[in-house]
Amino acid sequence: MSADLSAGVPVDISDGPGGAALGITPGDRIGPTFLEFFTMYDSRRRLLKAGAGSMLACLSTTAAPASLPPTSAVSDSLPSRTAAPGSLSSTTAAAGTPASAREPDAVFTSDAYQPGLLLHIVLFKYKAEVTAEQKLEVQRRFLALGGSKRAGAASAYILSITSGSQNSLEGVGQGYEQGYTVAFKSAGDRNYYVGKPVVTDQAYFDSRHDEFKAYVGPLLAPQGGVLVFDYAVEAQA
């Protein structure tokens, strides 16, 4: 590769053959355009030679092309992954976390725990012998859970439950026949609703939902009879 080396800054190749591989010798001076190329080339060579840890320790932000912002500027523009305790975005106390590694049930199932709209999606795939009447009865019982209340509460803790039969045209339904979406105002309400196997103390889960699970379980296909997907609403159009 040829380059105009008649002006610019001295090149330091004292620690290896980086510049020599490009036809540059100690003491040569190169222009700013070629300097940028050489910097990237030599940085890659040193990275392979010394390892990522030592290379990152010795590089400064001036070694990057001028069009790139300093690393600190990029990191400052990203959302923090550390959330305050009890916030919906916290990932340290998901419903699947073992009880020994999370908050006590009284906190974990409180309606004030991780407030924010949370949707609980459930899909059912039934055994071949289950009748249409049985499926309607499952739907009736599931929707009735919308009126369930916590002990001593004046109103239901579930915001809404909707249900319908599969009617997708895309051919990727994987055999699921009936779907439900349950809306909660907090992760704590969802945790109280889910109950077993996440929460096993009867004082901290909805016994009506537990009874429903015992009813519908024998009707579901033995393989993949139920699919559950929960998400906290993070964006909305």
Image (cartoon, rainbow, N blue to C red):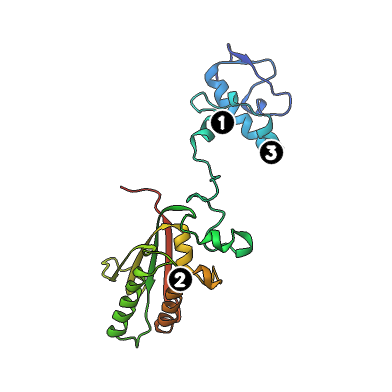
Q: Quadrant of residue 174?
A: bottom left
Instruction: Identify the residue position indicated by label 1 in the image.
Output: 72
89 in relation to 14, above or below = below
In the rendered structure, find residue 53 and report the number of the disc placed on it.
Answer: 3
In this view, the residue farthest toward the right is 15
Front position in the image: 197 or 56: 197
Q: Quadrant of residue 147?
A: bottom left
Question: Could you tell me the amino acid type at mark 2?
Answer: Asp
- For disc 2, the marked residue is 206
Q: What element carries label 1?
A: helix
State which quarter of the image contains the N terminus. Answer: top right
Q: In x, y percent, where is residue 124?
A: 37, 74
In this picture, is 120 found above or below 213? above
Position in image of residue 206 (x %, y %):
45, 71
Of callouts 1 and 3, the N-terminal one: 3
Give neighbour class at mark 3: few <14, some 14-19, many 20+ (Cα, 10 Å): few
Q: Which is more toward the observer, 112 or 65? A: 112
Give 105 or 191, whichever is nearer the viewer. 105
